[in-house]
Image (cartoon, rainbow, N blue to C red):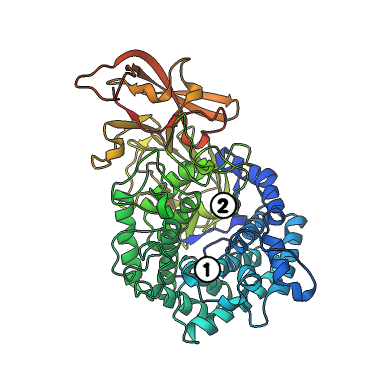
């Protein structure tokens, strides 16, 4: 069977088989724009930062026995992982748009890693340079296995892109070392930051080495047994409070929980252990119902970068880390492949177009670590909550963003022996299941998706189209269509070259109301159109009217306004809505025994959330109170 070139390639147990990145060409819409700026701006910036931030110099120092590198260690103990994510981004970009410079960077970095790697296979610049006597002695916060996981994923990407033999050799030596220490060597330690589990499974899928899968399973099974020492953040922080099969809700550090879940589903897909899939689905359902922002973001607490309690979703204090959005997409993609249920593709779409897309500036050179849903004019906290930044001391997010954008083609469609399934609607072409399709659409600005069969297989064949849960009335080729219980509308018949299907989604702007237990936004509404959540930025409001003084007028109907180009933002669709500009005296306490506010009718304007912070850096809010 052909080797699929993509980030997750499960066994035949998966309901659907992902299409390889070379079989998908994205030619228009926001996804194409993101990939273009990733290629032209983000990845070149990341490559520069690998030297400037210390990621490559640290590894040269670890290889000093080979005569290279001097000076102090730079950055955090997990600095190596920045390089590994950057390598993965470069590998997927090479698979998408091959360039000699990408292959050269991978080979040069692999050479540095090979010189730094110990004879026994261990590789971690911080512990080799700074704490050689503490190797595997501080797993609760060392990130040693976490870094290894990102190396394995980079090596898998490079190998699938056909450019990484030397990098794969480094990764396998390290993986074999981990097997010797943690699987057969009696060490029951677990990294406080999950990630290596999903990476080990993918390395198993590439190489066929069963021990990598067994080690991933052991690390998952050992959680909740108190084997992770307390880092000072508590047992929930590292998901060591309960065995994974017993936990009902996601807790602790959001990124760690979400990467762990991806690994849990991966192990299920290779072993068939239904208890793993069942517990992961159970936590997913609780998370979606009680711990997910309208943008698809996760993590409501700055303390511990953590999930909060159920319905604890404050907009201004949202952490919603960019890495959490990426980890959520990884988990949901694996759940989609494992179950074939469209609700996971729905959440991928919500996250991609909102929490994830907002992480990067329109020009691709600045990034958010934290993605709040409200920013006031007088924000005085650290810069992580302010405007996007070119880089961070803890730079986990930028290269993570780059690797996902480069591999977007691997998350759009799947195939079976009898057909193709479209999960995300993007202009371009795709091939699989014996067919070749062309997709023409102005999505997400427009709701019409036209699918043309350019090459048809012989005999009856099935095309499955996801019907987003937000589309209240959907038409397929002019007829009202309802999805099946899995969220897909299926057409099975013989096809001929040139056959066309038109999907028309309901793009009516609508007011979204929060669950009554979300105290922070009770009595407020948000705007959504298609998959896009909207926000009100100061730059778009009437002169003299502050965003925080606006309230939506009773019975107001949102109106979509198409804009071909907005300075600093690009193509967009704005939404206008009748609102009230509220004024209240500022004498004494901000409370009174009777209402003192007066209001003036105005028109408020909202922009897609993912396009915010590309202009004046002023106030912004997603949730707006009702007048």
Q: Which residue is mark 2?
A: 409
Q: Which residue is mark 1?
A: 142
* 237 relative to 495 in the view: left or right: left
Residue at (41%, 75%) from the top-left corner? 271
Within-10-Å neighbours for mark 2: few <14, some 14–19, many 20+: many
Residue 262, relative to residue 559: is it above or below? below
Residue 578 visible in the snapshot: yes
In the displayed orientation, state which residue is furthest to the front.
Answer: 588
Image quadrant containing the C terminus = top left
The local secondary structure at tag 2 comes to helix
- How far apart, in angstroms, are the residues tagged by discs 1 and 2? 33 Å
Name the residue furthest bottom: 185
At 58% across and 47% down in the image, what residue appears?
Answer: 429
Q: Is 560 placed above or below 384 here?
A: above
Would you identify the image quadrant in which residue 559 lies? top left
Query: Total label count?
Result: 2
Q: Residue at the location (46% across, 74% down)?
A: 216
Residue at 26% in and 41% down: 515
* Horizontal arrangement in the rendering, residue 169 relative to residue 309 (left or right): right
Position of 587 with respect to 430 (left or right) is left
Label 1's element?
Answer: helix
Q: Which mark is residue 51?
A: none
Q: Nearer the viewer, residue 469 or 368?
A: 368
Q: How far from the left and from the top, in percent, is residue 598?
A: 30, 14
């Amino acid at each position: 069977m052909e080797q699929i070139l993509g980030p997750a390639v499960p066994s035949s147990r998966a309901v659907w088989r992902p299409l390889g990145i070379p079989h998908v060409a994205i030619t228009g819409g926001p996804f194409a724009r993101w990939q273009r700026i990733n290629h032209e701006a983000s990845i070149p910036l990341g490559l520069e930062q690998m030297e400037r931030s210390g990621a490559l110099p640290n590894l040269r120092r670890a290889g000093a026995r080979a005569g290279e590198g001097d000076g102090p260690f730079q950055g955090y103990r997990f600095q190596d992982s920045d390089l590994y994510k950057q390598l993965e981004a470069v590998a997927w970009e090479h698979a998408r748009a091959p360039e000699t410079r990408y292959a050269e960077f991978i080979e040069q970095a692999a050479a540095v890693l090979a010189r730094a790697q110990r004879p026994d296979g261990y590789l971690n610049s911080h512990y080799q340079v700074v704490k050689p006597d503490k190797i595997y002695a501080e797993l609760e916060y060392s990130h040693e296995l976490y870094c290894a996981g990102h190396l394995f994923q980079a090596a898998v990407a490079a190998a699938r892109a056909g450019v990484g033999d030397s990098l794969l050799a480094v990764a396998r030596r390290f993986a074999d070392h981990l097997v010797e220490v943690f699987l057969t060597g009696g060490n029951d330690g677990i990294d406080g930051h999950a990630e290596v589990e999903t990476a080990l499974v993918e390395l198993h899928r590439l190489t066929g080495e069963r021990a990598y899968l067994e080690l991933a399973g052991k690390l998952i099974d050992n959680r909740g047994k108190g084997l992770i020492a307390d880092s000072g953040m508590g047992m929930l922080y590292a998901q060591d409070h309960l065995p994974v099969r017993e936990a009902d809700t996601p807790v602790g550090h959001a990124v760690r929980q979400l990467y762990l879940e991806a690994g849990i589903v991966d192990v299920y897909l290779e072993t068939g252990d239904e208890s793993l899939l069942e517990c992961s689905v159970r936590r997913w359902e609780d998370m979606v119902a009680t711990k997910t922002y309208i943008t698809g973001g996760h993590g409501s607490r700055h303390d511990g970068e953590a999930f909060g309690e159920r319905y604890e979703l404050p907009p201004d204090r949202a952490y919603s880390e960019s890495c959490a959005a990426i980890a959520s997409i990884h988990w949901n993609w694996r759940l989609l492949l494992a179950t074939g249920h469209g609700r996971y593709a729905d959440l991928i779409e919500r996250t991609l177009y909102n929490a994830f897309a907002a992480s990067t500036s329109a020009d691709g050179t600045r990034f958010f670590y934290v993605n709040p849903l409200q920013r006031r004019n007088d924000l005085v906290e650290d810069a992580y909550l302010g405007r996007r930044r070119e880089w961070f001391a803890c730079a986990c997010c930028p290269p993570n963003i780059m690797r996902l954008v480069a591999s977007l083609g691997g998350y759009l469609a799947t195939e079976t022996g009898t057909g193709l399934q479209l999960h995300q609607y993007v202009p371009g072409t795709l091939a699989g299941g014996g067919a070749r399709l062309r997709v023409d659409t102005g999505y997400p600005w427009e709701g019409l998706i036209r699918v043309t069969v350019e090459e048809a297989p012989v005999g009856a064949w099935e095309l499955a189209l996801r019907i987003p849960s937000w589309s209240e009335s959907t038409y397929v080729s002019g007829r009202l269509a309802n999805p099946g219980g899995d969220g897909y509308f299926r057409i099975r018949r013989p096809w001929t070259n040139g056959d066309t299907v038109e999907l028309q989604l309901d793009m009516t702007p609508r007011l979204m109301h929060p669950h009554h237990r979300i105290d922070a936004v009770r009595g407020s509404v948000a705007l959504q159109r298609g998959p896009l959540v909207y926000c009100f930025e100061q730059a778009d409001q009437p002169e003299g009217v502050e965003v925080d003084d606006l309230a939506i007028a009773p019975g107001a109907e949102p109106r979509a306004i198409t804009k071909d180009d907005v300075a600093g933002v690009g193509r967009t669709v704005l939404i206008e809505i009748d609102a009230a500009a509220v004024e209240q005296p500022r004498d004494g306490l901000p409370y009174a025994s009777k209402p003192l506010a007066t209001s003036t009718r105005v028109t408020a304007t909202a922009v897609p959330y993912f396009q915010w912070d590309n202009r004046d850096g002023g106030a912004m809010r997603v949730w707006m109170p009702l007048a």
